[in-house]
Image (cartoon, rainbow, N blue to C red):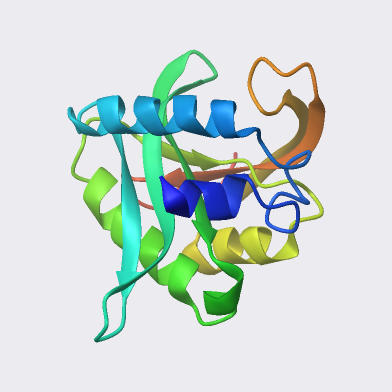
Amino acid sequence: MWVLEKTLGDPTQMVHLNGPESLERISRRHRAYVRMSSDRSAGCMYTIITGPEKHSVGNVGYWEAEWEGEKAWETGWFVLPEFQRMGIAAAATKLLISHVALLDRRFLLAFPSVGNQPSNAICRKLGFARILEKDLEYPPESGKRLRVNVWRFDLNGPEPAPG
């Protein structure tokens, strides 16, 4: 819960996601993550642990989504500011990809805001394909709009070239 408070509740961490969430909303999200993580076939949120001291430095997860009428996974990540720019989010997401590749969906999606250069760079680095740019409601049920890049990773391997 404290990792969520330091990420979702921090204005600097949430600058690309329409601002910080309230403690009440973070608590609801935490409960939902715990429920979801009890059945990994529906998704899971992991705490990212690093170093010999085993510091909790952020989180990464996947959950059910739908893309163009097909079931998919969606992913997202946060790393605490003092541990950013060390490759931790990319490494954690790479591990997550190797896990979800064993599950029953073809695609893993990510929706970083268009202005979030570090998250977009992680998607590029890990081999996601940028599909399009669009507006989404974020946080869900907030009425707030967010312009995002839609990135898609083919868990079955590289996508064939068009034509």
* Quarter of the image where one finds residue 135: top right
User: Compared to 42, does 76 lie above or below?
Assistant: below
Residue at the image point whose x is 20% and y is 28% from the top:
41
Residue 147: horizontal and vertical position, in percent? 81, 37
Q: Is residue 77 left or right of residue 43?
A: right
Give the farthest residue toward the bottom.
52
Residue 74: horizontal and vertical position, in percent? 46, 36
- The quadrant of the picture occupied by the N terminus is top left
Residue 18: horizontal and vertical position, in percent? 78, 38
Residue at the image point whose x is 45% and y is 73% from the top:
88
The reply to whether residue 33 is visible in this rendering is yes
Residue 134: horizontal and vertical position, in percent? 78, 31
Between 143 and 134, the one lying in front of the other is 143
Q: Is residue 102 left or right of residue 140?
A: left
Between 33 and 69, the one lying in front of the other is 33
The count of marks equals: 0
Q: Is residue 63 left or right of residue 124?
A: left
Between 116 and 20, the one lying in front of the other is 20
Between 74 and 57, the one lying in front of the other is 57
- The quadrant of the picture occupied by the C terminus is top right
Residue at the image point whose x is 47% and y is 30% from the top:
27
Q: Is residue 127 left or right of residue 136?
A: left
The reply to whether residue 160 is visible in this rendering is no
Residue at the image point whose x is 35% and y is 62% from the top:
48
